[in-house]
Image: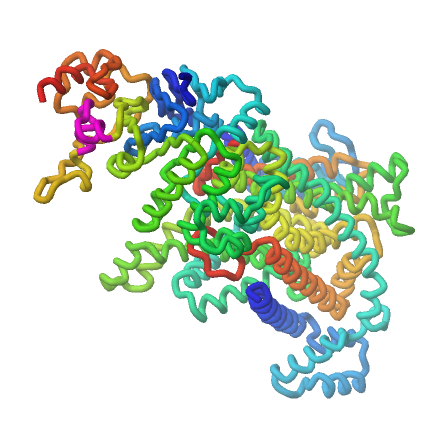
Amino acid sequence: MKDWLTRAGMVCLGLIVLVALASVVNLAGDPDEIVGPRLAPPGPGYWLGTDNLGRSMLPRIMEGIATTLLLSSVAVLVTAALSAVLGIVAGYRGGVVNELIMRLVEVLYSFPAIVLAILVAAVFGPGQLAALASIVLVTIPLMTRLVRAAAVGVAQRDYVTAAIISGARLPRILGRHLLPNVAGTIAVQVTYALSVGIAVEGGLSFLGFGVQPPQASLGVLIQQGTTYMTAAPWMITGPGVVFVVAVLAINVVGDGLRDRFEPRQARSLV
Amino acid sequence: MRLALWWLGRAVSAAATLLGVSILIFAAVRMMPGGFAETILGPFATADQKAELADRYGLDQSVFVQYGHWLAAVARGDFGVSMISREPVVSELWARLPVTGQLTLFSVLIATLVGVPLGVLTAVRARRAAVGRLLSGLGVSVPEFVLGSLVVFLFSRYALGLPAGGYDNVRSLVLPSLVLSFFAISITARTTRDAVMGVLVEPYVTAAVARGESPWFIIRHHVLRNAAIPVVTLLATITAYLLGGALIVEYVFNLPGIGSYVVQAVGRRDYAVVQAGVLLAATVFIVLNLLVDLVVGLIDPRLGVTSKGRRA
Amino acid sequence: MTALLEVRDLAVEYDSGERRVRALDGADLTVAAGETIGIVGESGSGKSTLGSAVGRLLPSTANRVTGDVWLAGERVFDLPPAGIRRLRRERLGFVFQDPIASLDPTMRVGKQLKLVLGSKGDPLSHLDRVRLANPGRVARMYPHQLSGGMAQRVALAIAMACQPRLLIADEPTAALDAQVREEVLEVVFSVAAEAGTSIVWLSHDLTAVARRCSRVAVMYGGRVVEDGPAADVLGQPAHPYTAALARSAPAMASLGDRLSPVPGRPPVLAEASHGCAFEPRCPYAEERCAKERPELHVVRTQEALCHRATELVTAS
């Protein structure tokens, strides 16, 4: 039952990545080239219509996917690396180190995602860097918390004690014994963080503080689409659908991964 | 006594977090383009004003002293003056509070009143799990700015009878609240469902079934109370999320709330407003979490006890 | 005399999608009113499934393949939902393994009892009945504040609140300390005796069960392989498995005896067994044991599912 859903999510995700790769070589044309009249409905030469400047929507959407995906992926990888280090160290060392790291996480966690993103944008100025930093700061708290929780469990196991007694060095204990055992948690959280990342990029770019035109991102395209929603509904339809499908697919895959790494059988009598 | 001690601990922790938040925002303000003086006074301040400010905030002294002055001012409710309106930031925010407050409150109410029953229902009738997952996934995946734009478009184009933009009275908040609660409903339903399903496999539920209690009796007396613990905890997170979402929804629906004001402020580089808005959101979240801890403490008698295993 | 509980040829399978496990493979059991019977078996022998089946408490992944259960004259699996609830409420009591977890953690003990008793009963008298010292104090406590022994007494008080005809106890003392275990055992049996309630006691400890129960049924591979008076089953086992089990029990050995564990592993059946499930581990196995399902043989006071039961007993 749920397996087909996870598989469908993976297929969608694979397609989205392929589309992003295809846009790098301008497979469907140059996203900045003006190919037809302004706000033209879908037709030959511009299968998904044109935007307010007469650019074809198809290559723009493809570029948007690539931008958003790349930005979110890089940010989430940064988050994963930082969270892995912070979470494992906090979980393993405990004490003051743990207290400090967790307090920092708590502080970041106290801001609603988009509010934190806005603060970041105010400091860095609108742009890709702001979007990137926002995604990292928004996704770090939850992932660090969960990695830490997993690491605390692992740190108390006997084989870790055995490694300590046998005189293994700290980097070796953390790298060889703790990291592999929290990798599942990180994998699950990376998928969720990716969907959060896409949402943050979308929200921030929609408000005008993220990716800046003429570069396309899903957020930028949706923002432009809302402006011309009445005259050219195709301008928002494509990016909107892609955005929802991407986030949905990632969440579904995340659920599938979670069921796999953190199985829990529900056998209720009620 | 046990509860009071536990809650006191939580309060101290919340205070520490709030302090951390203030440090972070202070650091951000100092890093903002134009620096501290412009953030507070705006770019057109005279040299006299700047000197007065430098004196007041101790700008010629160490960072720690500056932070102290800043914190003292913030604690008095002095966030500086809006560069655009030349009014104190506090009064600007205060004037916009009702719209944001009502919007958030309505959305929390809708999310709870719809999401919790939905979650209980889907947990008890766990068939069609994939469809449920897909639907709740959809709720989480449609962002406010897409849904909001769509609603604004439909209601303004086809005149469907509800105002979709601007603020006249409470009716203007109906659509924004619905849009804002869309995400919250699915996340509430999802959490409730997970919580209920978690409780349904507990031995004490099996024991109640074995005693011949009816499903609804068990849900009413055993499940709801126990499942409420994670759901109530979620409520604070939801509210925080909604505060963030309100920002976008206010922007989309052109509502004169704090959120849209802060968004404008970032665009106009009116940083005094930005710092105040951000601090407000974080403070509300921390205070709400503290309140939730209190409620959870009342529901769950195990809190604050060093229990032997079995959940903390 | 009609039996209080009758289980006939009950087969139950768990289907987890990928794997199918046949937990019960044609189990038979009869319990008369007022009788105390211990059901003994290793984990995986099907005793817990049997206990749950009596109250139709099987999880949704389990399905009954064949057989029936009669309790107080009613066919348990044919009752409508309201009927089975009434049966559980009026005739059955259950006590489970983890006493603290089987109480609602957010509710005081007194309130949980009151919920079961309705307006008519007095929680304190029920706590007193299971010999809890200071029932007033216990009633005001939350489950996590109770010790394991206290919690199991509370669970017993709740299970016995409606004077059931049959109490099913699923290893209720397994999680308790040895000394507390004896006390709880004592309380369960005396409270049941006062109320005239029959006991089905599920356990893996043959000797402990034999001391308390009037009858013992030994389960293996999802069937009851031997059934008879406790002293006889323990003293002169009719089934090779029971004999092996008795030899492996420390309490049964005299000083200087060598304990011999039962060799091999208990089976996990995927389908109905073709022969005797104990055949691979049985020192007396012969060709037909692997091919024919053993029939019931009456040996002395016991009934045994073994092709060679009569033969082996006369030989010894």
Residue B106 in magenta? Answer: no
Q: Which residue is painted at 54% across and 52% down in the image?
A: C139
Q: Decide if residue B204 is on the left or right side of residue C247.
A: right
Q: Nearer the viewer, residue C300 or C177?
A: C300
Q: Is residue C244 inside the magenta stretch?
A: yes
Looking at the image, which is closer to me, C268 or B265? C268
Q: Is residue C188 above or below residue B249?
A: above
Asked whether residue C145 is in view, the answer is: yes
| Residue A78 seen by the camera | no
x and y, in percent, of residue C120 in the image: 62, 40
First to last magenta residue range: C231-246
Side of C230 where A141 appears, left or right: right
* Colouring mode (rainbow / by chain / secondary structure / one colour): rainbow
How many numbered marks does the figure carry? 0
Residue A262 drawn above or below residue C30:
below
Residue sitting at x 73%, y 53%: A207
Q: Main secondary structure of the magenta part?
A: helix
The front one of A262 and B56 is A262
Could you say which is closer to the camera, residue A76 or residue C157? C157
The N terminus of chain B sits in image quarter: bottom right
Residue B63, percent from left and from top: 61, 82
Where residue B184 sits, quadrant-wise, is: top right
- Judged left or right of residue C246, residue A264 is right
Vertical arrangement, residue C33 with respect to residue B40, above or below: above
Q: Quadrant of residue C17?
A: top left
